[in-house]
Image: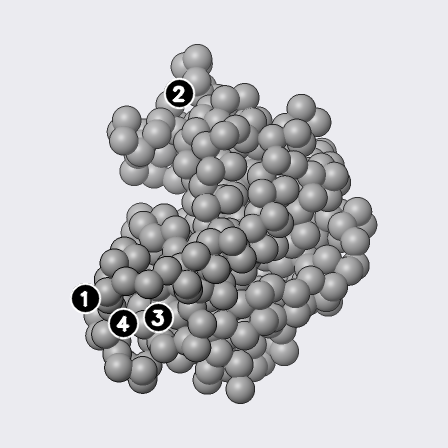
Amino acid sequence: MPDLFSSYTLKGVTLRNRIAMSPMTMYQSIDGLMNDFHIMLMGSRAAGGFGLVFPEQLAITPDGRTGTSCAGIYDDSQIEGLSRVTAIIKEMGAVPAVQLGHTGRKGSELKPWEGKIQLPPDHPDGWQVRGPSAIPYGGRYNYPVHALTIGEIKEIHRSYARAAQRALDAGFEWLEMHFAHGYLGASFFSPLANQRTDEYGGSLENRIRFHREALDAVRAVWPERLPLTMRLGSDDFNENGVQFDDAVWAVGVMKEHGLDFADLSLGMNTDDVQDLPFDDVAFMVERGNRVRREVGIPVGVSWNLGLPAVADRVIREEQIDLVFLGRPALSNPHWPVWAARELSHHDPFSLIPEDWSWWLRKRPGPEGSLGWPAATNNGNPREARPA
């Protein structure tokens, strides 16, 4: 039986455990370049014991960024910084993963702490956002949307392939395509955003044509020995949007197009939602397990999995294959070590670099003197309750 700290192999890649640091936009780039901040962030999480470490979503085109301070992989000049990130992740014992994406209607945006409003196309830091149809997202995203032509869609697919080649050149070993959270891929999937009447709109099969062709373009350059995965917006929580049954079917189709692993999340194609489960612990796990069972593909999910006992249980019960952690990874660089102590792992410090672990194991002192809180479960994984 696997547990949270079991190794995991997919294609030719083996992770030291089942814990992944999710991509999180940091707004710390200039000209899409990664820098010392990103090396610090990713290196510390790899050193902290995470098995799979993502930088933030990397934009495949300049207008695919959330804002001008977001990272990209649309120019060869960006490979050097990305290579430094992958090198430190590997040196600290983790596998470097990349998430390729395009924000579509939700781009051209201010940083969250500066208001997170969409900037007009004529603003020095703004641009004309693009999507499947000329339908603004709404709310704080209220500027006109350029409906992509078929030629522009084909060029975006070529941009995915070029980005995948740069990711390979930079040393990434796991590639995820971001088709969730209201971004471009998610908006093609959702009838709330996609009202095209050509081969990219209308039926469910047509609405995932964008995804299939993007996967095909990336698979052509991404080696078969390395995992090709996808984060899919699997539910809009709106009766007129994507339903979870749609997502189950779509993952099955994309498995036939070379998809190795499904990372399931939310659609977020509208603010008009009902019954969002944001207060529920591990609310995506049951959905992920359904895809795992019915499609026969490995699955990972995120959302409210930061309690060690819960994260361990869903792996032990083989409901999902990987646990993705966002804010827990941001708040605690050594979350895996903390979780190992909470779950009475026989050697929690084995998760971190050897030189650190030697000193932490050997240094004598009273309980708590190393700066780690005492484990509170008396050796037995306890059932966690919502905070």
Callout in the foreground (2, 1): 1
Q: Are marks 3 and 4 in contact (CB under 8 Å)?
A: yes
Of 381 and 306, the residue lying toward us: 381
Other-residue count near label 4 (Cα within 10 Å), few / some / many at <14 / 14–19 / ≥20:
some
Q: Amino acid at mark 3?
A: Arg
Q: Amino acid at mark 2?
A: Pro
Closer to the chain start, of discs 1 and 4, is 4
Task: Please report whichever mark, 4 or 2, sits nearer to the chain's N-terminal start.
Answer: 2
Which mark sits nearer the N-terminus, 3 or 1?
3
The residue labelled by disc 2 is 120
Question: SS for tag 1?
Answer: loop
CB within 8 Å, label 3 to label 1: no
The alpha-carbon separation of the residues under discs 3 and 4 comes to: 6 Å
Q: Please say whether residue 348 is visible from this viewpoint.
A: yes
Nearest to N terminus: mark 2 or mark 1:
2
**C-beta proximity under 8 Å, tags 4 and 2:** no
| Callout 2 secondary element | loop
Distance from the alpha carbon under mark 1 to that under mark 4: 18 Å
Residue 112 percent coordinates (x, y): 31, 33
